[in-house]
Image (cartoon, rainbow, N blue to C red):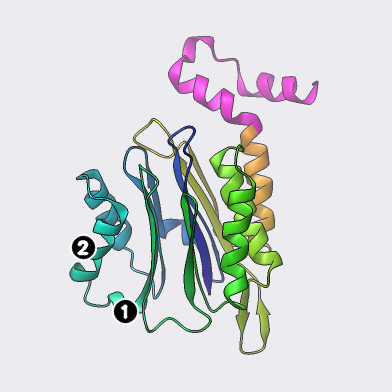
Amino acid sequence: MTFSIAGYCAETGAVGVAVATYSLACGARSRAVAGAGAVMSQGFASYVIPDEAMRLLREGLSAPEAMARLKAWDPDFDWRQVSLVDAKGNAVGHTGTHPRAWSGQLNGRDCVACGNVLAGPQVVAAMVGAFEAAAGQQLGERLLRALEAARAAGGQVGPTGPVTERSAALKVALGESFPVRDLRVDFSPSAIVALREVHDEYEKMAPFYEQRWKDPAANPPQDVYVASLQSR
């Protein structure tokens, strides 16, 4: 019961991934590395696939080449679902034969959306459509809008009807060896709503956090910065 989207920003070179699921702490199974790419492992998720995917992308393999290597490397690959994008915008998804219906993926411009135990293919189509429609926005915003569109299109559906998303995550990497956005909701009855709240609040603080590590001498006290936001 998961849907995710991996995407690339052609304007900035940023890569990222966003995911929501009934499972807890889904951010642990996603990665975003500048100059390499972004990945999400779901379905019968593997905790080692994300690191292996990043290793392959760092070696210079494209997303399709890395996916082929993962298939050969993981004996249980037919149980997996994977969203993968590289630093050049090549995006590829994988859905094995064992994830429960409805399961599948859809490519769009600079993105790939994957999902399992969904209301239907309209859910991944909504993710791609929202991502493409938000061209010109920051990558994190585009990825988050894709999650919101997936939920609105029916999201996850179990045997008795719709199933809420209990965790969600957003990771974006740009110009650093670590994600410049690494936002997670590990448990919430409304995880996508909670992730939106975290994202919007973090965006207000992002300039402060960037200056704090790049130019600490010029950085004001955090409470002073917050007060300046409230006075605007």
- Asked if residue 6 lies left or right of residue 222, the reply is left
* Mark 1, other Cα within 10 Å: few <14 / some 14–19 / many ≥20: some
* For residue 143, above or below residue 175: below
Q: Residue at x 53, y 10 (%)?
A: 218
Q: Disc 1 on helix, strand or loop? A: helix
Q: Earlier in the sequence, mark 2 or mark 1?
A: 2
Q: Disc 2 on helix, strand or loop? A: helix
Name the residue beneath numbered marker 1. 78
Amino acid on which disc 1 is placed = Asp
Res 80 visible: yes
Res 189 visible: no
- Asked if residue 44 lies left or right of residue 153, the reply is left
Q: Residue at x 47, y 69 (%)?
A: 105
Q: Residue at x 38, y 84 (%)?
A: 98
Taking the view exactly as shown, the residue that stands out farthest to the bottom is 159
Percent across and percent down for residue 195 are 63, 52
Name the residue beneath numbered marker 2. 69
What is the span of residues highlighted in magenta in the rendered image? Answer: 204-232
Q: Is residue 227 magenta?
A: yes
Principal SS element in the magenta part? helix
Q: Is residue 64 magenta?
A: no
Percent across and percent down for residue 36 are 31, 43
Taking the view exactly as shown, the residue that stands out farthest to the top is 217
Spatial CA distance of label 2 from label 1 is: 14 Å
